[in-house]
Amino acid sequence: MRMRKKPNLIPRMERCAEYLITDPEAWRGRWREKLSPNCALRLELGCGKGRFTCETAAAEPDVLFVAVERVPDAMVIAMERAKAVGLANVFFIDADVACLRDYFSPDEVERIYINFCDPWPTNRHAKRRLTHPGFLELYRHVLRDGGEIHFKTDNSGLFEWSLFQFPKADYALSEVTRDLHGGGIRGVMTDYEEKFHSLGTPINRCVATKLHREPALPEENATPEEMPLL
Ligand SMILES: C[S@@+](CC[C@H](N)C(=O)[O-])C[C@H]1O[C@@H](n2cnc3c(N)ncnc32)[C@H](O)[C@@H]1O
């Protein structure tokens, strides 16, 4: 369910309109025109208020970042942060992650960040978890082979469940830790991460790398209609 929009949302959005992509379908397959032809393209899914997005983009000006967030009241804060420091390599899409294939073409993306996504603890809502098998298949369409998902969460139940899902969807796990900051702060923190870390909650992190899948071979007795196009 969408939050009710704050009354001053529209003028705030307009003041940083250069960061908002209102026609993401039009950029499908040509995002790099926004920065440089051979730049890496990374997505952040559910960027919230954008501390991680903006600090990461500032640290890597040659990388193009596109952040997707379905709550505009949070996303406008991220856009304001980008404008405040004049970032030229980050853009925002106000949309549901489920639409990703409409906005990015196959193999277009090098890396996806999923930071502190909602855990949706009941089985009834499991499909909404951004690491649900349905979403992991969706990401496979836009990630190139060898592309990575960088996943962080405070929720150990969600983390253990996700560690089980990634290999089933043909991703290889690496850099698995259940206490990312145990030896001191590592990497750029998100807004949620800072809050949980300050409360003493350990942060879980892993990297899931998309493995190549051979196209399925036709079954021996398959009729021509059942045979996949190779
Ligand atoms: C718990 S917050 C974390 C925000 C930020 N990543 C952080 O770590 O500070 C999760 C964010 O993901 C967004 N979100 C959840 N599911 C989404 C979806 N399907 N499409 C787009 N955004 C989504 C929510 O609106 C929310 O802003």
Image (cartoon, rainbow, N blue to C red):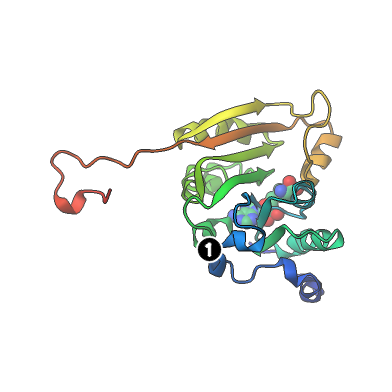
- Residue 64 appearing in the image: yes
Residue 7, position as x, y percentages in the image:
80, 74
Q: Is residue 141 left or right of residue 8?
A: left
Where on the picture, by quarter, is residue 194? top right
Q: Quadrant of the N terminus?
A: bottom right
For this orientation, the residue located farthest to the front is 37
Task: Inspect this view and state whether residue 95 appears.
Answer: no
Instruction: Give the residue at x 29% y 41%.
Output: 216
Q: Determine whether 193 is above or below 42 in the image.
A: above
Instruction: Provide the secondary structure element on which disc 1 rests.
Output: loop
Q: Quadrant of residue 198?
A: top right
Judge the density around disc 1: few (<14), some (14-19), many (≥20) Cα neighbours within 10 Å: some
The amino acid sitting under disc 1 is Arg
Q: Where's residue 18, x and y in %?
A: 74, 70
- For disc 1, the marked residue is 28
Quadrant of the rendered image containing residue 206:
top right
* Relative horizontal placement of residue 109, taking residue 202 as reference (left or right): left
> Whole-percent x and y of residue 96?
59, 60
Give whichever of 219, 28 is nearer the camera. 28
How far across and down, in percent of the image, does residue 174 sit? Answer: 59, 28
From the viewer's perspective, is 221 left or right of 44?
left
> Does ligand 1 reach within 8 Å of label 1's beta carbon?
no
Give the residue drawn at x 81%, y 23%.
Answer: 183
The residue at the point 82 percent across, 63 percent down is 83
Q: Report how many numbered discs are placed on residues in the image.
A: 1
Q: Which residue sits furthest top?
A: 183
